[in-house]
Image (cartoon, rainbow, N blue to C red):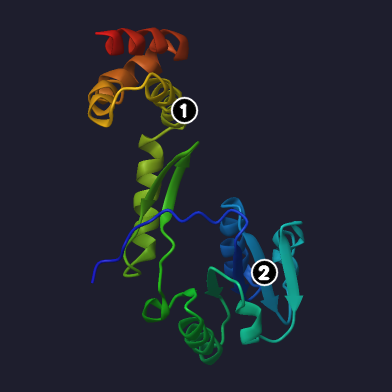
């Protein structure tokens, strides 16, 4: 069955990562970037990954895994090299109704972490439902060449324009019609070639028309 793709708000919410190797560090870093309160549970922490775990928004618990550490979590990531432990973590999450991702074991995942191209607030996520993460990574590299920082800057301009249009009070149908042209490829080309100031004049002309 197809998965339900979402962008999950994690700001200030508890996320538990069990394990402290390089993979766990990458997962923790991604969660930190999303604003989560990250809890690391591990008996040992490798020297080469310790930098991530010294972030002030990370709580490190040097201990054997316990189900109690999952309390209050929105999601958990099991990133240990112990299959039996990973399975136990997944079962505990099922009982507590916490979303769980067991690294490299698609059958024990409630969600998959996509490969992402990020340009400002523009995020393009590529998923393969766990079938082949390497292919998702390959596609990410290709998309990263196509979508540049200019696309992120363009989105910021569109957001400001949308806010202004909403404040002017047209209904939803009118807003959709008004904002349809500024998001088009021709509009992006104007922004890239002429810069933000000239694009704003271009967009204003479109809207007034």
User: What's the distance in space between the residues labelled 1 and 2, CA to CA?
Assistant: 32 Å
Q: Is residue 143 left or right of residue 79?
A: left
Q: Quadrant of the C terminus?
A: top left
Q: Residue at x 54, y 84 (%)?
A: 89
Q: Is residue 54 left or right of residue 76?
A: right
Q: Quadrant of the N terminus?
A: bottom left
- In depth, the one of 175 and 180 nearer the eye is 175
Instruction: Find residue 68 and report its image quarter.
Output: bottom right
Q: Earlier in the sequence, mark 1 or mark 2?
A: 2
Q: Is residue 22 left or right of residue 124?
A: right
Residue, disc 2: 39
Q: Residue at x 49, y 75 (%)?
A: 98
Q: Residue at x 41, y 12 (%)?
A: 200
Q: In the rendering, at what x and y percent does residue 34 appear?
A: 56, 52
Q: In the rendering, at what x and y percent does residue 67 appear?
A: 61, 86
Q: Is residue 129 visible?
A: yes
Q: Secondary structure at mark 2?
A: strand
Q: Is residue 103 visible?
A: no
Q: In the rendering, at what x and y percent does residue 4 appear?
A: 31, 62
């Amino acid at each position: 069955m197809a998965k339900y793709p979402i962008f999950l708000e994690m700001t200030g919410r508890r996320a538990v990562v069990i394990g402290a190797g390089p993979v766990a560090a990458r997962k923790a870093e991604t969660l930190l970037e999303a604003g989560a309160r990250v809890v690391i549970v591990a008996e040992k922490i490798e020297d080469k990954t310790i930098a991530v775990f010294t972030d002030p928004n990370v709580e490190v618990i040097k201990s054997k895994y316990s189900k109690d550490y999952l309390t209050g979590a929105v999601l958990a990531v099991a990133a240990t090299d112990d299959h039996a432990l990973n399975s136990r973590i997944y079962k505990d999450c099922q009982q507590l109704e916490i979303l769980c991702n067991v690294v490299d074991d698609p059958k024990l995942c409630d969600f998959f972490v996509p490969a992402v191209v990020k340009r400002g607030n523009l995020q393009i996520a590529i998923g393969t439902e766990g079938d082949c993460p390497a292919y998702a990574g390959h596609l990410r590299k290709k998309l990263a060449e196509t979508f540049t920082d200019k696309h992120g800057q363009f989105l910021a301009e569109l957001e400001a324009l949308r806010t202004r249009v909403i404040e002017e009070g047209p209904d939803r149908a009118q807003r959709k019609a008004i904002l349809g042209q500024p998001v088009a490829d021709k509009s992006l080309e104007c922004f890239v070639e002429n810069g933000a100031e000239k694009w704003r004049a271009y967009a204003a002309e479109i809207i007034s028309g």
